[in-house]
Image (cartoon, rainbow, N blue to C red):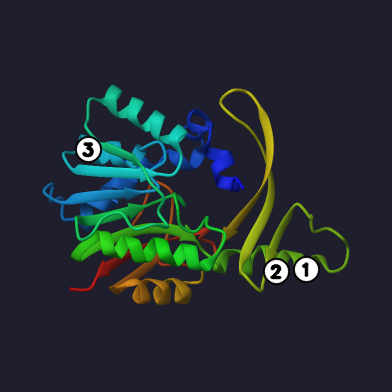
Amino acid sequence: MTRWYETLFANFAGSYDKECFTQGTVGEVDFVERELGADRSKRILDIGCGTGRHAIELAKRGYHVTGFDLSEGQLRRAREKAAAAGVGVEFQRRDATQPHFTNEFDAAIMFCEGAFPLMETDEKNHAILRHAAAELRPGGKLLLTTLNALFPLFHSVKDFLDAGASGAASDKLTFDLMTFREHAELTFTDDAGKSQTITTDERYYTPAEMRWLLETAGFAKVDIFGCEIGQFSREHALGTDDFEMLVAAEKGE
């Protein structure tokens, strides 16, 4: 059975690059550089690289980058963009829930929910983190963004409770308090002009859950911050108004 994210990204690369949340690439890569001390000898893995916006920007700055994604449509556009930019990035079609490399990279990035936390089970999401750890050299860094459960708990659920039994809550957008999963009916138009409707299934995580998941995956140090598109910073404390959290984890020696 085709999964919702496979349907969405099969022919959506052009539209994806126009989304508002993809416009902060330069500032986000600035953060990566700060985390790596601008050491261009570092090898970087972009997990769930999509159309390659972060990988290409890093390559422009002189980094050796490998990117992989499940969607061949996204990768096709990534290769076209890299060629147009005159940079070499190795783009591969791979599944992040499976192991691929061992101790080969100094850093890995996973931004804009490129893989984690779109999986349909917690086990698959955890597998992505475990494999990311295995792909890094000891002391390597994983930098990722993911959905912040504090946001719907404080906002969406609060609004629903405030509405009482008035029937104001839509059955097209639900948040399950038992699983911290949001299900939403999404209608979109793909790059061929075809309209499609899918039901998304995304997992929100609390900061405590993220710390536990990463520590059990092999990371010795985990720092969590608030996340603002294009302005990633360790100075931004995570709060209930942050839709996403920014995570910096370091693999144990």
Judged by depth in the image, the label closer to the viewer, 2 or 3, is 3
Mark before the other along the chain sequence, 1 or 3: 3
Other residues around mark 3 within 10 Å, as few (<14) / some (14–19) / many (≥20)? many
Other residues around mark 1 within 10 Å, as few (<14) / some (14–19) / many (≥20)? few
- Secondary structure of the residue carrying tag 3 is helix
- Secondary structure of the residue carrying tag 2 is helix
- Mark 1 and mark 2 in contact? Answer it, CB < 8 Å: yes
Calculate the distance from the C-alpha at mark 1 to the C-alpha at mark 3: 49 Å
> Circle 1 is placed at which residue position?
162
> Circle 3 is placed at which residue position?
59
Judged by depth in the image, the label closer to the viewer, 1 or 3, is 3
Q: What percent of the width, then of the height, locates residue 7? A: 58, 40
Q: What percent of the width, then of the height, locates residue 220? A: 27, 75
Label count reads 3
> Circle 2 is placed at which residue position?
158
Residue at the image point whose x is 55% and y is 64% from the top: 121
Q: Quadrant of residue 75?
A: top left
Which amino acid type is shown beneath numbered disc 3?
Ala
Asked whether, in this view, residue 205 is left or right of residue 154, the answer is left
Q: Quadrant of residue 225?
A: bottom left
Which amino acid type is shown beneath numbered disc 1?
Asp
Asked whether, in this view, residue 22 is left or right of residue 204, the answer is left
